[in-house]
Amino acid sequence: MTGERELQLIETAAQWLAATPKDVRPRSATVDIMERFHLNPLLACAAIRRYHQMLIAGGANADAT
């Protein structure tokens, strides 16, 4: 089960992913998120999934991917 702190980190990581252009992040998003936010692989993937949900909902800049 994911706790409140993990949910906050997932949301923060998703927002960071949306705000950071891909050319500024030379490594894979999973590795960057794991190291930057100290998330395990499962939670890093949850952050990427959240980012994609934001894109679909129109809440993130599509050019940042």
Image (cartoon, helix red, strand yellow):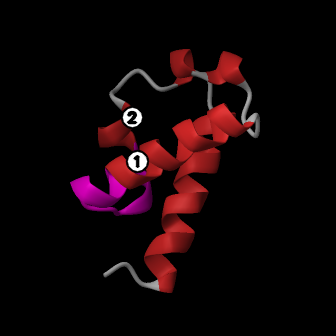
Would you say residue 46 sits in the magenta stretch? Answer: no
Of helix, strand and loop, which mostly describes the magenta segment? helix
What label sits on residue 10 in the rendered view?
none
How many numbered discs? 2
**Residue stretch in magenta:** 33-44
User: Badge 1 is on which residue?
Assistant: 33
Question: Is residue 35 visible in the rendered structure shown here?
Answer: no
Which residue is at a point 31% across and 81% down the rendered structure image?
1
| Badge 1 element | helix
Nearest the eye: 6 or 21 = 6
Whether the residues at callouts 1 and 2 have beta carbons within 8 Å, the answer is yes
| Badge 2 element | helix
Please name the amino acid that badge 2 sits on: Ala
Dividing the picture into quadrants, the one containing residue 20 is: top right
Which residue is at a point 42% across and 84% down the rendered structure image?
3
The CA span between labels 1 and 2 is 6 Å
Left or right: 49 in relation to 11 = left
User: Badge 2 is on which residue?
Assistant: 29
Please name the amino acid that badge 1 sits on: Ile
